[in-house]
Amino acid sequence: MVERIPMSKAGHLTLKEELHKLERVDRHDVVKAIAIAREHGDLKENAEYHAAKERQGLIEGRVMDLKDKLGRAEIIDCTKVRCDRVVFGTVVELLDMDTDEEVTYQLLGPEESDVKKGSISVLSPLGRSMLGKEEGDDVMAQTPGGSREFEVLSITASSFA
């Protein structure tokens, strides 16, 4: 059975754009770099050749990874999710009970989460512990830094897909 990967429309588009660039631009550039490096002679001691071949391997690995993830993607329109409970795509405002600090996160898939941009993975410890919670509920999360307690202040839909 294929394990589906939850993904927003925007996240899916971003991965498709990255795949397109890797296949249409980066692959061709690295093939040219390999050809130029070969012209420099002895391949055993040719650092440019070895670097280009390593880059080619990284590109091919990422292409395979992206194709796999895009093939298993379950695309969710984050502007149309229900907001009565915390689910994938919702924007959740939390109160950190230890610091009295308010934080806001959008629950997204593992490929598109970025704490610095205000999104966390639905599969992260905090993301998992928030699922199904309603406004006013307490959330206990076992994080690598220890146990943390939050209160759900609000749940809203994202303004972008």
Image (cartoon, grey):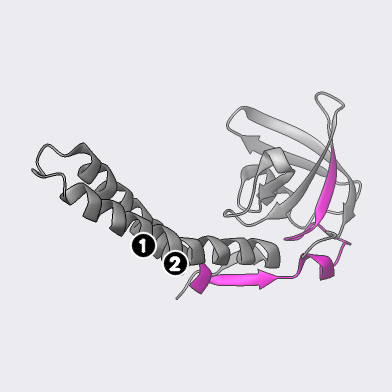
Q: Residue furthest top?
A: 99
Q: Residues within 10 Å of mark 1 (few under 14, many from 20)?
A: few
For this rendering, which residue is in front, 105 or 37?
Answer: 37
**Which mark is drawn over residue 28?**
1
Q: Residues within 10 Å of mark 2 (few under 14, many from 20)?
A: few
Which stretch is magenta? 67-94
Seen at 22% across and 55% down, the residue is 35
What is the quadrant of the C terminus in the image? bottom right
What is the quadrant of the N terminus in the image? bottom left
Q: Amino acid at mark 1?
A: His
Task: Report helix, strand or loop for mark 1.
Answer: helix
**Which mark is drawn over residue 93?**
none
Return the x and y of residue 43 as percentages of the image width and height.
Answer: 11, 45
- Name the residue beneath numbered marker 2: 24
Seen at 84% across and 40% down, the residue is 94
Q: Is residue 60 above or below residue 44?
A: below
